[in-house]
Image (cartoon, rainbow, N blue to C red):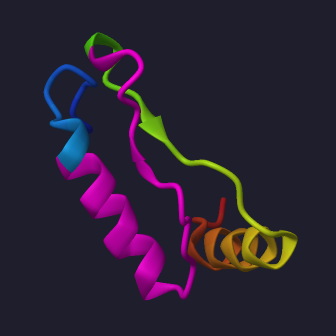
Amino acid sequence: MAEASATEVDPFTAVESLRAALDEVGVVFPSLAVDAAAPNLRLVELGRVRVDVAMRLARALQRGSPTT
């Protein structure tokens, strides 16, 4: 599947997609939002997370990583 470029994706859609995917693996980024400081850059602010949340995210990514 081809990935869309940053100019093709609405940043608010990206945030909601990421929030939904994180929710599926039990991870919450409280500060997840569109970065309003530079809207022309279309950045997503991930914010800070506690270490236990970072570890849950790492485990979820490791489980989903493709084998080579």
Quarter of the image holding residue 3?
Answer: top left
Q: Is residue 2 visible?
A: no
39 with respect to 58 (left or right): left
Q: In this view, does 39 lie above or below 68?
A: above
Residue 29 percent across, percent down from the top left? 56, 65
Query: Which residue is nearer to you in this view: 8 or 38?
Result: 38
* Figure label count: 0
Query: Which residue is nearer to you in this view: 68 or 39?
Result: 39
Q: Is residue 9 visible?
A: yes
Magenta stretch in the rendered image: 13-39
Q: In this view, does 3 lie above or below 60?
A: above
Residue 12 percent across, percent down from the top left? 21, 46
Residue 22 percent across, percent down from the top left? 47, 73
- Which quadrant is the C terminus positioned in? bottom right
Residue 60 percent across, percent down from the top left? 63, 78
**Was residue 36 drawn as part of the magenta stretch in this picture?**
yes
Q: In this view, does 8 lie above or below 44?
A: above
Residue shown at 70% from the left, 71% from the top: 62
19 with respect to 9 (left or right): right
Query: Which residue is nearer to you in this view: 28 or 55?
Result: 28
Residue shown at 19% from the left, 19% from the top: 7
Q: Which residue lies furthest to the front in this view?
A: 37
Q: In this view, does 57 lie above or below 2?
A: below
Query: Which residue is nearer to you in this view: 32 or 24?
Result: 32
Residue shown at 56% from the left, 74% from the top: 64
